[in-house]
Image: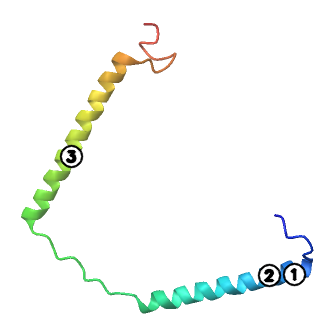
């Protein structure tokens, strides 16, 4: 790190001490502020069986699409590129 010409070690130490004090004060202010702004959140309501089934169906459909897309990418990769010297199609 470069310091301005003419700065002594004492000058640098003084600046760093002031910086440390300022940072500590800033951290303390942030902690005090966060304590004042704390909120109590309500626990989410219990979901009905129908809602759980609906959400699970959405997750299952998304997973199925992902599996199909991965399969399609694998088929494209098999036709268009070699994966390495020990791959079954490397001699083609």
User: Residue 6 vs residue 1: left or right?
Assistant: right
Q: Which residue is mark 3?
A: 62
Quick one: quadrant of the C terminus?
top left
| Real-space CA distance between mark 1 and mark 3, rounded to the nearest whole angstrom | 63 Å
Q: Residue at x 33, y 26 (%)?
A: 74
Marks 3 & 2, CB-CB < 8 Å contact: no
Q: What colouring method underlies this structural image?
A: rainbow
User: Residue 34 vs residue 12: left or right?
Assistant: left
Q: Helix, strand, or loop for circle 2? A: helix
Q: Which residue is mark 2?
A: 15
Q: Helix, strand, or loop for circle 1? A: helix
**Image position of 35 with respect to 5: above or below:** below
Q: Residue at x 27, y 29 (%)?
A: 71
| Real-space CA distance between mark 3 and mark 2, rounded to the nearest whole angstrom | 57 Å
User: Residue 73 vs residue 60: left or right?
Assistant: right
Relative depth, front residue between 9 and 3: 3
Dividing the picture into quarters, in which one does residue 7 lie? bottom right
| Residue 15 spot, x, y in % from top left | 79, 81
| Residue 56 spot, x, y in % from top left | 16, 55
Disc number placed over residue 64 in the picture, else none: none
Quick one: quadrant of the N terminus?
bottom right
Relative depth, front residue between 88 and 92: 92
Dividing the picture into quarters, in which one does residue 78 lie? top left
Marks 2 & 1, CB-CB < 8 Å contact: yes
**Image position of 17 with respect to 87: above or below:** below
Q: Residue at x 48, y 89 (%)?
A: 33
Q: Which residue is mark 1?
A: 11
| Residue 8 spot, x, y in % from top left | 92, 77
| Residue 83 spot, x, y in % from top left | 46, 21
User: Residue 23 vs residue 85: left or right?
Assistant: right
Front tag of 3 and 2: 2
């Amino acid at each position: 790190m470069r310091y301005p010409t003419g700065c002594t070690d004492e000058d640098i130490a003084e600046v760093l001490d002031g910086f440390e004090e300022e940072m500590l004060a800033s951290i303390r202010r942030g902690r005090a502020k966060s304590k004042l702004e704390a909120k109590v959140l309500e626990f989410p309501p219990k979901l009905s069986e129908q809602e759980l089934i609906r959400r699970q169906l959405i997750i299952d459909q998304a997973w199925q699409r992902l599996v199909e897309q991965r399969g399609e990418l694998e088929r494209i990769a098999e036709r268009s590129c070699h994966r390495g010297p020990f791959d079954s199609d490397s001699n083609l």
